[in-house]
Image (tube, grey):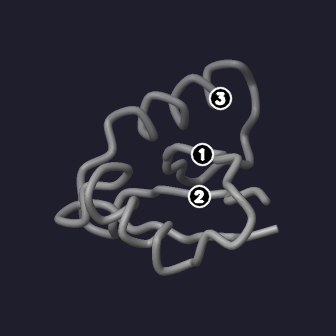
Protein backbone atom coordinates (compact mmCIF):
# COMPACT_ATOMS: atom_id res chain seq x y z
CA UNK A 1 0.00 0.00 0.00
CA UNK A 2 1.31 3.45 -0.90
CA UNK A 3 0.54 6.89 0.41
CA UNK A 4 1.31 9.87 -1.75
CA UNK A 5 1.45 13.13 0.15
CA UNK A 6 1.63 16.56 -1.45
CA UNK A 7 2.68 19.40 0.82
CA UNK A 8 2.33 23.01 -0.34
CA UNK A 9 2.62 26.38 1.29
CA UNK A 10 -0.68 27.99 2.24
CA UNK A 11 -1.85 30.94 0.18
CA UNK A 12 -0.36 34.16 1.49
CA UNK A 13 2.83 32.50 2.77
CA UNK A 14 5.94 33.91 1.11
CA UNK A 15 7.43 31.34 -1.28
CA UNK A 16 10.95 32.47 -2.25
CA UNK A 17 11.73 29.20 -4.03
CA UNK A 18 8.59 29.52 -6.10
CA UNK A 19 9.58 33.09 -7.02
CA UNK A 20 13.08 31.86 -7.98
CA UNK A 21 11.54 29.19 -10.23
CA UNK A 22 9.23 31.79 -11.79
CA UNK A 23 12.12 34.17 -12.51
CA UNK A 24 14.43 31.43 -13.77
CA UNK A 25 11.82 30.14 -16.20
CA UNK A 26 11.24 33.70 -17.45
CA UNK A 27 14.98 34.20 -17.91
CA UNK A 28 15.13 30.94 -19.88
CA UNK A 29 12.51 32.26 -22.31
CA UNK A 30 9.43 30.51 -20.98
CA UNK A 31 7.13 33.52 -21.13
CA UNK A 32 3.84 31.88 -20.15
CA UNK A 33 4.60 31.40 -16.46
CA UNK A 34 2.69 33.97 -14.41
CA UNK A 35 3.44 32.45 -10.98
CA UNK A 36 5.08 29.40 -9.45
CA UNK A 37 4.59 27.80 -6.05
CA UNK A 38 6.81 24.98 -4.89
CA UNK A 39 6.14 22.21 -2.43
CA UNK A 40 7.19 18.69 -1.67
CA UNK A 41 6.04 15.21 -2.54
CA UNK A 42 6.42 12.32 -0.12
CA UNK A 43 5.71 8.70 -0.97
CA UNK A 44 5.35 6.14 1.80
CA UNK A 45 5.22 2.37 1.48
CA UNK A 46 2.83 1.25 4.19
CA UNK A 47 1.80 -2.02 5.74
CA UNK A 48 -1.57 -3.28 4.54
CA UNK A 49 -4.36 -1.93 6.65
CA UNK A 50 -2.67 1.33 7.60
CA UNK A 51 -5.48 3.80 7.91
CA UNK A 52 -5.75 7.21 6.30
CA UNK A 53 -6.18 8.57 9.81
CA UNK A 54 -2.71 7.22 10.72
CA UNK A 55 -1.19 8.88 7.65
CA UNK A 56 -3.01 12.09 8.51
CA UNK A 57 -1.49 11.97 11.99
CA UNK A 58 1.99 11.44 10.42
CA UNK A 59 1.42 14.56 8.35
CA UNK A 60 0.25 16.66 11.27
CA UNK A 61 3.07 15.52 13.58
CA UNK A 62 6.04 15.37 11.20
CA UNK A 63 5.59 15.68 7.47
CA UNK A 64 3.91 19.08 7.23
CA UNK A 65 4.10 22.29 9.18
CA UNK A 66 0.39 22.91 9.46
CA UNK A 67 0.90 26.52 10.50
CA UNK A 68 2.18 27.42 7.02
CA UNK A 69 1.55 24.33 4.88
CA UNK A 70 -1.41 22.42 3.46
CA UNK A 71 -1.22 18.75 2.60
CA UNK A 72 -3.23 16.19 0.72
CA UNK A 73 -3.10 12.41 0.96
CA UNK A 74 -3.70 9.82 -1.76
CA UNK A 75 -3.81 6.17 -0.76
CA UNK A 76 -3.29 3.43 -3.32
Give the labeled residue for mark 2: 5
Residue that numbered label 1 is attached to: 41
Q: Residues within 10 Å of mark 2 (few under 14, many from 20)?
A: many
**Residue 32 position (above or below residue 23):** below
User: Between tags 3 and 1, which lies in front?
Assistant: 1
Percent coordinates x, y for residue 17 in the rendering: 40, 32
Q: Position of residue 52 (x, y in %)?
A: 57, 78
* Image location of residue 33, percent across then percent down: 66, 47
Count of numbered badges drawn on the protein: 3
Where does label 3 land, which residue? 25
For the residue pair 21 and 2, the one nearer the viewer reads as: 2
- Say which element carries label 1: strand
| Mark closer to the chain start, 3 or 2 | 2
The spot of residue 34 in percent (x, y) is 59, 53
- How crowded pointer 3 is (Cα within 10 Å; few <14, some 14-19, many 20+) is rated as some
* SS assignment at label 3: helix
- Rounded to the nearest angstrom, the CA distance separating label 1 from label 2 is 6 Å
Q: Quick check: 13 left or right of 39?
A: left
What quarter of the picture does the C terminus occupy? Answer: bottom right
The kind of secondary structure element at disc 2 is strand
Q: Is residue 67 left or right of residue 39?
A: left
Amino acid sequence: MKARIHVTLKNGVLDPQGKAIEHALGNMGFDGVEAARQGKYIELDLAAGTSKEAVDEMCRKLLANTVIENYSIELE
